[in-house]
Every structure is written in C-alpha cells, then in structure tokens.
Amino acid sequence: MRLHGTQLVNEQGHLEIGGCDTVELAKQFGTPLYIMDEAHIRDICRQYHCSFVEGIENAEVIYASKAFSTLAMCRIIDEEGLGLDVVSGGELYTALQANFSAERIYFHGNNKSREELAMAIDAGVGRIVVDNFYEMSILNELAQGRNQQVNILLRVTPGIEAHTHEYIQTGQIESKFGFTLPDGTADRALNLALSYSNLVVKGIHAHIGSQIFELESFRHEVQIMINYMADILKRTGCLLQELNLGGGFGIYYASGDDPALIADYAKTVQSALEDACHDQKFPRPKIIVEPGRSIVGTAGTTLYTVGSIKEIPEIRKYVAVDGGMTDNPRPALYQARYEAVLANRANEATVESVSITGKCCESGDMLIWDIELPKAISGDLLAVSCTGAYNYSMSSNYNRLTRPGVVLVRDGHADVIVKRETHSDLLRNDILPERLKYLQMASR
Ligand code: LLP
C-alpha cells in the first residue's frame, strides 16, 4: 500500500497516522473507524491556495463539502481560507452551525426545494448556482417576496465527455444537470435570468465530472466556457465576470492511478484562460474551482477488524471485516479500487492473494478484490487507505449496521469528530403506533 500524508510504519511494525498508532486507535475507539489526517488535509488546502489563489489572478478555491461534511471539516476549511460548496439544506446547515461565513458559500443542486432556497437566501449565501428553469422561477419569486437581490451563477452543461466512470460524468449533453449549451437552452436561461429583476447573474458554472486525470479536459472546459462568455458579451452586451469550473481533479487510490500535481492543474487552467481570453479578446473573469475528493480523499483511512475467513480451494479466499458497503459503497457503485495493509503487521511480507469482503448480506458487498497480504488471521486490523472522500458522506445503515465514528488525528492526538452510532441511534426516529404495541388477535 502506498503511504499518504503522515502515514508511516512505526518501530512496532504498526501503521501510524498523525502520530497515532492505529493499533492503539482501534483499542481506544473500536472498529470500524474512519481516521482523518488533519495535517494532510491542511497541506492539500495550502497547495490549492498556493497554486490557484496565489498563482492565478483573481481566483477562489471552494471545497465541495459533499465529499466529507462535518462541523470540524468546515472549521478546517474556514481556517485554511477556502470557500465552501454545499448541495443541500443539510450541508448548508452544517456549514452555518460551524460558523462558516455565508458569503463564502456556493449553493448547488439540480432539485433544490423551495425551503432550501429560502434557507439559502435568508442565510445570505454568496452564490446560488441555478440549475434549471423551475428553480429559477422559484428563486426569483422568493427574492421578490423578500425585496432582495440574489447573486446567481448559471450551471451550464458544456457537452464534454470527461474520461471517468459514467456515473460520475456530468458534462455530457445527456446529463441531468444544468442548462445545455450546444442546443441553445443555456441562452434561453440567460435571457430569462437577465429579465428577472431580483436575480443578478454574476457568471456561469460547469462541472464536467469527477476523478479526472487528463488535464486536457479542464483546458477544453475553459475554452468552451470563455468562448461562450465572449459570445454572450457580443450578442447581449452582458459582461459576465465569474467562471466556476467545478471540481473533478482525480486522486490516487490504487496502483495504476496517476494523478497530476495540483500545481500543474492550476497551470493548465491559467494557460487555457490566457489563451482563450486572448483569442476571444475577452477580459479575464474571476476563476473558481471546487475540489472535493482531492482535498480529503487521500487523508482518510478506514480501520477494520478481520473476522471470518473463508477459503474456497483453488478459487478464492474471502477475508471478512466488520464493515463493508455501508461505510464504503464505492466499490459496489463504481467498481472503485482500494489498497490496504494489515495495520498491526504493516512490515510483514505479503504471502497470499485474498479478497476483502464486508459483513452485509449481499454478495456485492466487496471492498477489495484480489489483494496481496500477509496471512491474515481473525483479529488482525486491516487499514484501507484513501477513504476520506465519499465514504462517510455516502455511508448507510443497511442491515441496520451502525455507522463508524470519525477521529481526526494530528501530532499524536486523536479527537472524535463524529461519534460512533449506537443501536439506540438506529431507533431514534422509529415510532411504534399504539395499535402495534400489544399482541392483538388478527381480525379477519
Ligand atoms: N462541484 C460540483 C458541482 C460537483 O457536482 C462535484 C461533485 C464537485 C464540485 C466535486 O467534485 P470532486 O472534486 O470531488 O471530484 N460519489 C462519487 C463522486 C460524485 C461527485 C459528485 N459531484 C464518488 O464517490 O466517486
């Protein structure tokens, strides 16, 4: 397994993260456990800040909190000086409860409810990224009712097919998101938005997909968007000054993944911007990028305890852990690949190929197919790396499994930032109607 951030193997041969021995973390907090490496998250935030905010004139980086949204995470992002992207009332509520200043929040989503839009206006979020005509009319009505002006970006679907899993592609024409550019829908949306007196169109937004390795996709995106902004200026005289390029920068999960450097990502955006603005004689707009996965992905590790082991001679050996698709649905959803190590014997040579399965009642509940490990025995600890993004945030209670806790580690300290769920948490919202409380004869 490749080590990330502050991960190292200590003298006892144990995996250590943020100066904390994972064997001790397992004893103290139990498993499964999500471990987040604070220094690593901050380091990546700083790389983004340095490459984009300091490296490009008039640029902003906003963290896509759907990747991992908790109070502590919002505080870290705030302290690192980045903005925040939220996609629901729940993510907005989390940010506001963390005292994140509303002006630095962007609100996305393809089906925001009236209540969510009202909540965003009342909180004073910086930008609402309008996705469709239905939303636009509700938003204008709400803004009118409050006699307020609301700053918006229009989400445009540019017609780019980024090379990534089809479930996480979003720039292609048939996407459910945004106003389609090539067929003229985006023009209609812009005209309508400009006619609404309570909406102020600040710019446009596009997000072409996620886990993208080819920087050329982003160059292409910049070209299309600047061409479009220049076209709008020529046709309508309206000068849009903000261009939000979305997120999507890919990360390393397992061998074969070869992500670019954040600095090179910024250079690509910068040079594409210079070229396109020069070609179109268009004044440089403010640039916004919205990384989610690349800020937290490699900073997360999930720690499990090995339980049952089933060997089917000549076929496969299953090593089962005490979590699974409930804490990491990504292998089942996107055929995502991961690396892992026995955290209590991290120096030992690998001797066999096994498959890591979870404890859910589903054959598809697999975490890793065919991984080389030392001979695992029940009670060993298995650490799966790069689980910081879209794991906790996509976790579920399927099979009524309780969600793991999350600890934030740094300089030898571990702070619980999300408590492990208990069985009684599972029943928190269950209600037993009076008529079901006592055994009654069924009336036939
Ligand atoms: N901005 C917008 C409008 C987005 O829709 C997304 C991700 C991002 C930014 C952040 O993208 P990132 O930098 O994280 O790639 N659950 C999937 C990923 C879904 C991404 C959805 N949108 C997964 O686990 O791979």
Image: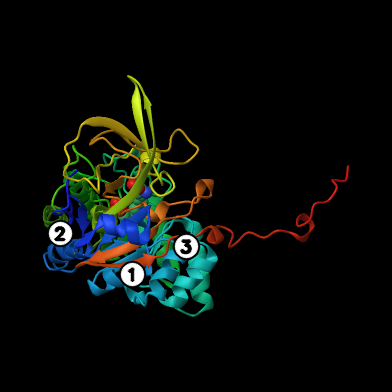
- Residue 204 is tagged as none
Q: Is residue 315 above or below residue 56?
A: above
Identify the residue shown where x is 51% and y is 79%: 146
x and y percent of residue 394 in the render?
A: 41, 52
Look at the numbered disc 2 and give the secondary structure of its residue: loop
List the residue tagged with mark 2: 281
| Percent of width and height locating residue 204 | 31, 60
Q: Residue at x 19, y 40 (%)?
A: 257
* Above or below: residue 98 compared with residue 11: below
Work out whether residue 65 can be spotted: no
Task: Name the residue carrying label 3.
Answer: 136
Q: Residue furthest bottom?
A: 147
Q: Mark 3: which amino acid?
A: Met
Tell which residue pokes out farthest to the top in this image: 314
Spatial separation of the CA atoms under disc 3 and disc 2: 30 Å
Classify mark 3: helix, strand or loop: helix
Task: Find the distance from the CA under tag 2 to the CA under tag 1.
Answer: 44 Å
Of labels 3 and 2, earlier in sequence is 3
